[in-house]
Each structure stands twice: as structure tokens, then as C-alpha cells.
Image (cartoon, rainbow, N blue to C red):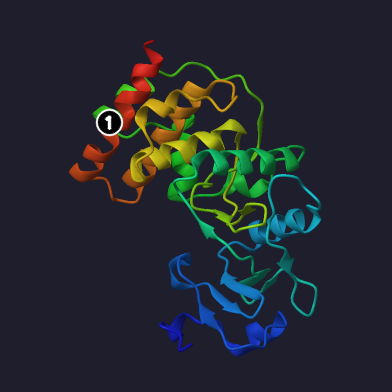
Amino acid sequence: MVPTNASLMPPPLVFAAFGASEPPEQLAGGRGLTWRSGQIVVRPTADTEEASWKSDVLAEIDGAEGFAVPRPIPDYRGNWVHDGWQAIEWIPGAADETRVRDVVRAGQAFHRAIAGLPCPAFIASSDDPWSNADRIAWGEMPVPDDRLLQRLVAHYLPVDSLSHVIHGDLLGNVLFAEGRPPAVIDWAPYWRPSGLGAAIAVVDAACWHGYPLDALSDTHGISHWRQLLLRALVFRMVTLHLLGRWDDQQTDRHTPVAAAIIALMEK
């Protein structure tokens, strides 16, 4: 296959460092920066500390029930990152954003497997729209001046669930393949109650993939579900604000979901 954007392809020495020798194929998604060579996937990382920490964890997850993860691949020196690139094993499958319950179930299994991890230092020091939107959603930074956001925040109540390391972007990052457990990929770590990962997945499905609004009341057995839904939607909306992508179309898209979640608060 001829690469569609060869300028973004890792240099040959990077592929070689991870033991990848077959002709590279650019994969869909990943901002056009993810490449497959045989059974090895190579992608860039902007944070060596985070990439190395996640690789250490994922390399040790073994025999977990209910999900799989791609194994990280070290370079020839035994390092997880080589010249700003990392490698993982290729896992067959495709995301299916309509399989919300299956995504939630796989995410919950993943969270049980990592529940005992301490909070990594890079979560507190991160400074990007997603990290700051997470802090805003949890009252650690001021909320942008937006009427819909203010309506949501007005319904906040305390959440006393313990925080853990979670995956905060599950919906499009669980791969399904016949005869294989769901594969959890592209781990986005946050330090929050474990149910937040499911709430973000459900909110994403409702905003972007036609998930029925009356199904938002399904708690999936998660404590403080309604409060987590509120914070999940605030997180996604604030991220769009911080990225400069919030406009009237986004308001129209998110308002029905916000109204449905607020209605749950008032029951």
C-alpha cells in the first residue's frame, strides 16, 4: 500500500528499532500518524513519561476477564519510546459506537484490572484542553461563561466515590472482533471515580451516535450515575470551548442531552 501521507511516516530506523520489517500501512484515525507494519503498530507520543508509564502497566495485565489490551513492544534497547515513537501489537477489530452497553462492560472490566494503581504524577502536571476540561468539570477551575454549562453545574451535588486511574475516552476505543474479547485501546488516563469512564462513553453516544435519551437513566450499576453524567457532559462541552470549536451547531447538538440529564436530576 502506498502511504497517503508519507511525510508523517516514521523513519525506517524507527520501524527497525521495534523489529518491524514489513511495508508500512497508514491506519485510519490517530490523526494520520499511526502506522502498521505486519503485527506491529507504530505511533507518536508527545509525553514519554506518560507513554512509558502506560506501557509498564499494560505489559503486566495478563489473563483479565472481559477485555484485552494491545501489548506494548519495546525497542531493541528495551525502551518503550524511541525517538518520540512507541509500538504496540496489532489487534484485529473495529470500534462500534452503537454497542454502548458492551463498551461500558469492557471499560468496567478494564477499570477493575487497574483499580489499585497509584495516581501517576503526569496527571497533575498535564496542561492541555482535555486535562483542563476535566478539572473544570470537577470544580477545580472556573467554568466558561456559557448558559448551558451554568445550567448543568447548578445541579451538581457532591460525589463521594473514591478516585482511581480511569480510561476517559472509551466509546471509540473499544474494538470488537468475532470470537475475541473487546480490546481496550488508546488509554486516556484521568484520576476520577471509575464510573466516570462509562458516563463519558454514554454522553458521547447520546451526543454523536443516536443513543436514546431515555436510556440515560440506565445506571449500569454505577453509584452517583446522574452526577457523573452531569460532569461527563460538562467535560465534553468545556473541551470544545477550550479547543475553540464551540458554536451554535454544538449548542444545538448538546442542548437536548443536557435537558435530558437535567430532567433526571429533577425526578
| Image location of residue 118, percent across then percent down | 74, 40
Residue 113 in percent (x, y) is at: 74, 42
For the question of whether residue 196 can be seen, the reply is yes
- Residue 191, percent across and down? 61, 38
Q: Quick check: 224 above or below 14?
A: above
Residue extending furthest top?
A: 267
Q: Left or right: where does residue 238 sit relative to residue 188? A: left
- Nearer to the camera, 202 or 147: 202
Image-quadrant location for residue 39: bottom right
Quadrant (top left/top right/bottom left/bottom right) for the C terminus: top left
Q: Is residue 22 above or below residue 220?
A: below
The residue drawn where x is 43% and y is 19% is 156
Other residues around mark 1 within 10 Å, as few (<14) / some (14–19) / many (≥20):
some
- Could you tell me residue 91's position as x and y percent? 64, 65
At 46% from the left edge and 80% from the top edge, which residue is drawn?
8
Which one is nearer the viewer's eye here, 16 or 79?
A: 16
User: Callout 1: helix, strand or loop?
Assistant: helix
Report which residue position mark 1 lands on.
Answer: 256
Residue 134: tell me if it is visible: no
In the rendered image, the residue lying farthest to the front is 179
- Residue 68, compared with residue 109, is above or below; it is below
Looking at the image, the residue that sits furthest to the left is 248
Can you tell which quarter of the image residue 235 is in? top left
Residue under the image location 59 percent in, 21 percent down: 223
- For residue 159, side relative to residue 264 (left or right): right
In this rendering, the count of numbered labels is 1
Amino acid type of the residue that numbered disc 1 sits on in the rendered structure: Pro
Judge left or right: residue 173 versus residue 238: right
